[in-house]
Image (spheres, rainbow, N blue to C red):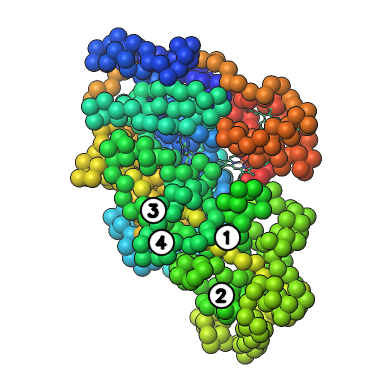
Amino acid sequence: MPVAGAAYTLVVTERNGCPMTSLRILLAAGLGVLLAGGCTGQSREAAPVVADVIVIGAGIAGLSAALEAAAEGGRVLVIEANSVGGGHAVMAGGLALVGTPLQHARGYEDSVERAVEDLMAWSPDADRDWVTRYLRASGPKVHDWLAGFGVRFAFILDTPQHTVPRFHFTPRGAVNVVLPLLEAALESPEISFLWSHEASRLLTERGRVTGVEAQSLRDGRLIQLRAPAVIVATGGAQGDLGEVARVWREDVPLPGQMFAGGGAFADGAGHRLAEAAGAYLGRLEWQTIFTNGIPDPRDPAGRRGLLALNPAGIWVNAAGERFINEAGPSKDADRAVLEMTPAMHWLVFDQAGLKELRIRDAIWLTDEVLEREVLGNPALTHRADTLDGLEALAGLPPASLQRTVARYNEQLAAGRDADFSRFGGPRSDPFARPLLEPPFFALARFPLTRKSNGGIAVDAFARAVDSEGRPVPGLYAAGEVTGVAGINGSASGGEGTYLGPAVYMGRLSGRAAMLDQRPTRASSATTAAVDEPVPHYGEALDPVTLSRLVEQPRRGYWHFGKVHQIVLEQRRDCAACHTADWPAAPPAGPAAMLAQLPSCTQCH
Ligand SMILES: Cc1cc2nc3c(=O)[nH]c(=O)nc-3n(C[C@H](O)[C@H](O)[C@H](O)COP(=O)(O)OP(=O)(O)OC[C@H]3O[C@@H](n4cnc5c(N)ncnc54)[C@H](O)[C@@H]3O)c2cc1C
């Protein structure tokens, strides 16, 4: 049985008379060191072949790729920088799907043709071929395939991008799409995981990708692993403000202040790895940047942002004036704010509207923390008993806010928004309400990075291609690292058009990675368990030691730190999650990783 999780697993296989070597030997040999291959066709210095396919990244695209390659008979190794799987999807919402049983049950008549026109109308510069291919596949190859893993959709949101409702949600969002995939991958004897390891380089031989060099984020050791196919599924670059700014598009000014709203490991590493191996990177400047971000009060570096919404509020610019239909498509608002100088605006609401305030991406937020760290924090929120007072705190021109709110309230009473058609028109906003009741609140909102719409160029089989469109042998890419193949165009904040395509592309890449090597594939594969321990904190920790560890920011323990900061703050009992099956210790294999999964939805 292979062993995954913190312990290393590997597969010893016979291939063309060449034994694949276990990771244990690699580790014992001091890592970074390459074993003599001794088989025909291999250079003397080559590291051992450890799998048929190596997938980099255990997000929704990488897990889909791994499951598909395994279904095609492949042995798969997944390398993941984080200590847990799922990627961004654990924080995300729904999927755009066409022709599903739920649509039928609700009486929504949909078709691929109509969906293609909707997506192209929303993002005219999207890649029509990929849009069509994805939408055609979204029922049979995404919805039905997910259903096979137990994913059940419960409702469909009606949103502006789709003229027929097709934005599908499970009762909890995408976490319940990706966790069943993670569970199936952990259960699969064909799939092994190397957690807390960051891919740092692709190995190449004569223009062909032959493996991956990765570094342990827990002990710094380097390791080289070979496989005839490598799938890059590392997500976008939206966690790295420097990278977002570096590729910023020329026709929109770069905001003076911006916050990161992408994953901690979404730093564009996959782009650099693939480019160095010969792949072409296209449309990197295509990025979805939201403009409803506030600084994350818990990030001492001041780089991370949270998403703040209040459908009962109004938005005003630096002149204290409304500038847009607040309930209109978010992509229009994003564009309008990015073109303002400075690129920011104020979200203004009153005491009655306070209950509609939503702060997203902050798992640690309770009502008490909201009051202390957001509403009561003058760096984030201005609060005053009069509009005059609020205006002064926010530095808006005298009497501007008063005038704006008076006009807004009058128009609401008259039933028509003559300025921006928020109400009184065809899509009248049910949340619009007068601002009357003190205290009044103003939150400054800034650009928030979100989604990469460009990246590694791929062909129709998710094979990475060079600048001439020729596949780079042995290299595949799926998900946001490709900008989901350009199906969202340059700037769209598409509704469900990242997760579904990530599943589809993951499957395509997993299949292509196996089919491309079929003629040369050897037949019998055997597995051997490896029980190499990973350095860890030891047995159950007392709260004092735990809090000391949590306070040390170390990348290899990033998620451990996030989790246990909440555990300590909310004084949760260790036994609420850790059990005899899953002791408070590093997971020793897939069984221990599987035992963790029920805890995930306590927070996600
Ligand atoms: C808050 C939020 C809400 C969203 N809501 C929606 C929605 O409702 N609908 C929708 O369709 N989309 C949504 N999206 C977008 C969607 O979640 C992502 O596009 C999608 O999850 C990307 O999946 P992925 O597998 O391509 O990449 P990721 O989920 O980013 O996974 C990449 C994985 O690779 C790992 N990794 C990165 N670099 C390395 C390396 N060098 N070595 C090893 N591992 C590495 C990362 O740790 C990560 O686990 C949302 C995004 C965010 C941030």
Q: What is the spatial separation of the Cα atoms under label 2 and label 4, in whole angstroms?
A: 22 Å
Image marks 3 and 1: residues in contact by CB distance under 8 Å: no
As shown in the figure, which amino acid type bears the numbered disc 3?
A: Val
Q: Quadrant of residue 11?
A: top left
- Element carrying mark 3: loop
Q: Which residue is mark 2?
A: 317
Can residue 436 be seen from the camera position used here?
yes
555 relative to 535, above or below: below
As shown in the figure, which amino acid type bears the numbered disc 2?
A: Asn
Which comes sooner in the sequence, label 3 or label 1?
3
Q: Which residue is mark 1?
A: 293
As shown in the figure, which amino acid type bears the numbered disc 4?
A: Ala
Q: What is the spatial separation of the Cα atoms under label 1 and label 2, in whole angstroms?
A: 15 Å
Q: What is the spatial separation of the Cα atoms under label 3 and label 4, in whole angstroms?
A: 14 Å
Q: Is residue 322 left or right of residue 473?
A: right
As shown in the figure, which amino acid type bears the numbered disc 1?
A: Gly
Q: Is residue 350 left or right of residue 220?
A: right
Q: Which residue is mark 4?
A: 491
Image marks 2 and 3: residues in contact by CB distance under 8 Å: no
Instruction: Give residue 408's position: percent from left, percent from top.
Output: 62, 84
How many other residues sit within 10 Å of disc 1, few (<14), some (14-19) or many (≥20)?
many
Marker disc for residue 247: 3
